Image: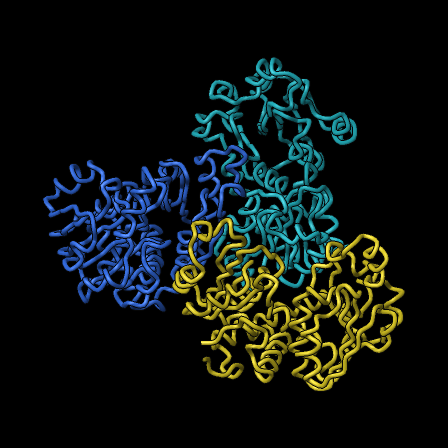
Chain colours: A yellow, B cyan, C blue
Amino acid sequence: MRHLIDPLDFSRAETDRLLSLAEDIIGSPADYTHRCDGRILATLFYEPSTRTRLSFESAMMRLGGKVLGFASAESSSASKGESVADTIRMISGYADIAAMRHFKEGAPYVASRYARIPVINAGDGGHQHPTQTLTDLLTIRRKKGKISGVTIGLCGDLKFGRTVHSLIKSLVRYEDVKFIFISPEELHVPGYIVEEVVKPSGHFYREVRAMEEVMPELDILYMTRVQRERFFNEEDYVRLKDSYILTPEKLSLGKKDLAVMHPLPRVNEIAAEVDEDPRAVYFEQARNGVFVRMALILALLGLESDVLEKGE
Amino acid sequence: MRHLIDPLDFSRAETDRLLSLAEDIIGSPADYTHRCDGRILATLFYEPSTRTRLSFESAMMRLGGKVLGFASAESSSASKGESVADTIRMISGYADIAAMRHFKEGAPYVASRYARIPVINAGDGGHQHPTQTLTDLLTIRRKKGKISGVTIGLCGDLKFGRTVHSLIKSLVRYEDVKFIFISPEELHVPGYIVEEVVKPSGHFYREVRAMEEVMPELDILYMTRVQRERFFNEEDYVRLKDSYILTPEKLSLGKKDLAVMHPLPRVNEIAAEVDEDPRAVYFEQARNGVFVRMALILALLGLESDVLEKGE
Amino acid sequence: MRHLIDPLDFSRAETDRLLSLAEDIIGSPADYTHRCDGRILATLFYEPSTRTRLSFESAMMRLGGKVLGFASAESSSASKGESVADTIRMISGYADIAAMRHFKEGAPYVASRYARIPVINAGDGGHQHPTQTLTDLLTIRRKKGKISGVTIGLCGDLKFGRTVHSLIKSLVRYEDVKFIFISPEELHVPGYIVEEVVKPSGHFYREVRAMEEVMPELDILYMTRVQRERFFNEEDYVRLKDSYILTPEKLSLGKKDLAVMHPLPRVNEIAAEVDEDPRAVYFEQARNGVFVRMALILALLGLESDVLEKGE
């Protein structure tokens, strides 16, 4: 049995086959509407996350399956002091596959060790969020036709943003990716990502402070939130924040086929006027999250036997 | 694409066809059990309302469809500051139709402007609650055979009760409806409803202070809650409240085929003994809410193409 | 129409037929996957209980049915002061069967009096929890081949534990059951259970203070939680608690075919190492809870007509 806890749990070949399956679902959704008839997904959300939870639920329902679970820790047995290990063993009798979000890093991994059903990490603390990474990869592939060869600008909070770190770790497995890190000094990409992930991969990378400098070069602009509370002082925040807000003016510098991505929710880092631009693909990206999760559920349940290698 | 935000969004002809569809569903429920197979309803309840939410969920399930969503704002992305516009664009990728309840007036309207799926207003602040109005109209039609020609007593808090205002606005579109407003002075029907809605319609209306005065005339008695906190002082409340509580004694003055309605939940404004009287139709009215929502979902999804005109 | 409010609402013959149906479902689950197509279960949980709620939901989904409801009182109409009687009459229009958990003893019974659909008590205060009892009986029958003739040790808090009391009341209806009550003095089985239930039944019983004394005699060891707050003083708790924690050492004294049960959630009263022992059947017991609820739903909906006698 396989689980998905870390974005790198799947090999590049497995990931590529999973993305192909997701694209096949997008192309022929009617072929998949009954693939999970009679199957049950448990959504175990110890920490609320409407977007991620509903994306999983929509995925399972689009496959004909059903969903049970909880949306926050308060209404769960967790409040009675039950361990994650016991909960997942109980849930293994109730459902066929589980998606777990937990405020504690490592909780979904612990669950996977005791589960008799496949476990998907739907986000654990500030740690991993592998289905977001798969969603990002699918979006890049669908907009660019391929992942190898793209020039991607990662913009905003590159220090604390886990989605950015996971995406970088996955992208270095492709060929000839160029990374442009766009962030204030205070929120630049951590040293270990540069030293241990990017440099050993041999991929080109560059760090800049403003998106205007690099906009014309980019195939992908991946926006993230810059939170006021990350700054040491208000002055720095006020001085810097405008460089990390995407406006129609800045976007006008971009290529005609640039794709602007964002993991959502966004607050004000992308101006509302940008939404109308065909290069704004973040809502399409959210929709891709449903298709990639459909593919993932099918693969983990063994209903598409040629996607994943046999489990450990 | 059509939405339902205001009870008057549907013309009288559209409303009548929708009620006919609801009656057809009541008569032949088995014909409808698979009409929404594979479809998903999103219930987006920023404000809890068990009754309304479960009524929508039951409606979608009775049609063979599935349901996802949230039951309160705390477990929603709203807590991360996401706008209603962004949420509905995300949800448009997850579901086929949405029912939104929001504490802020106008939120469902904003959602409908950004949605790629039909949006139903399931109540916005003290503003509109159009599916309650449709439920009321269906109940009147089923109990009386028609809506035109009825004499309806509206009793209780006619000042703040939005269901009463919406019902009046819809009823004036029918012929020869007689309105009897039964309320304490403090809670009488607002001037603009009388001046701008009732009078221009040419329909008969009358204001009284006690239901006993008019009981024998009524075809419909529509009860609402009189809340203690609406009164300026406790004395007035104590003095007046009994006039607005329906008891078997008061009911004995009514016609044999009177229909007593209430939008529910009721607290004490209808005595429990009245429940046994066949003229008490409020639980049947609640059940009608499921059928009218089934018809509404079918119409908005275009699965019953002859109910609504083409959208704006 | 029948309801299940008290574990003894079903005769022993009815209970035995229900357990047989559950065993048939375990043996041939595929025969049951569409038995509740188009049916709706309402889970009305005024008090959160993830385990019980999800067990009911899984049961209904495994039968092909759908589920709506609420997981806690906050998001229910209860907060608007609606009575249980009114809520169940509303729900009777929305669903085909209801499972109610309530913090108030007797609430599910009240609901059953006003319902037009079968009502299952999913736990009311410290009072009854009949589906737990059915789950326990099914587990004993599956592990021992029969219920009559077993020697059962009930261990831990026998004073406040409602599951233990209900189980005793059900077990005395079988032949030749031997009861061993294992508890600290402070938490021993209440006098009325011994005097009014066990003694009149003529069954053997014995009270001991430590499980080591009786371990080799037991066919079933039914563990329950010993809560620190039940003790008069900390010293007593520290002195006594170890006698009520099941360890591999204590388990080594047991028979080869002993079955260790626990209603779950457990905190520390069973050491984690015991989980690996094949005699630990508490997770299987949790799974049995789904099968027994599937049988119960079928029986109450009249979809298995030979289980229950005609209703009152």
Q: Position of residue C84 (x, y in %)?
A: 44, 36
* Relative to A288, residue C167 above or below: above
Tell me residue C109's x, y (percent): 35, 38
> Which residue: 75% across, 50% down?
B110
Is residue B3 found left or right of C227 in the rendered image? right
Find residue B149 and report its horizontal and vertical position in percent. Answer: 64, 31
Identity of the residue drawn at 62% across and 14% down: B236
Q: In this view, does C131 lie to the left or right of B225?
A: left
Q: Residue at x 23, y 60 (%)?
A: C250
Residue B232 vs residue B126, the one in the foreground: B232
The residue nearer to you, when weighing B238 against C129, is: C129
| x and y, in percent, of residue B90 in the image | 68, 60
Which quadrant of the rendered structure holds the N terminus of chain B? Answer: bottom right
Q: Quadrant of residue C254?
A: bottom left
**Total number of numbered discs in the rendering:** 0
Q: Quadrant of the C terminus of chain B?
A: bottom right
Residue C4 visible (yes or no): no
Q: Can residue C91 be seen in this view?
A: yes
Above or below, B127 relative to C42: above
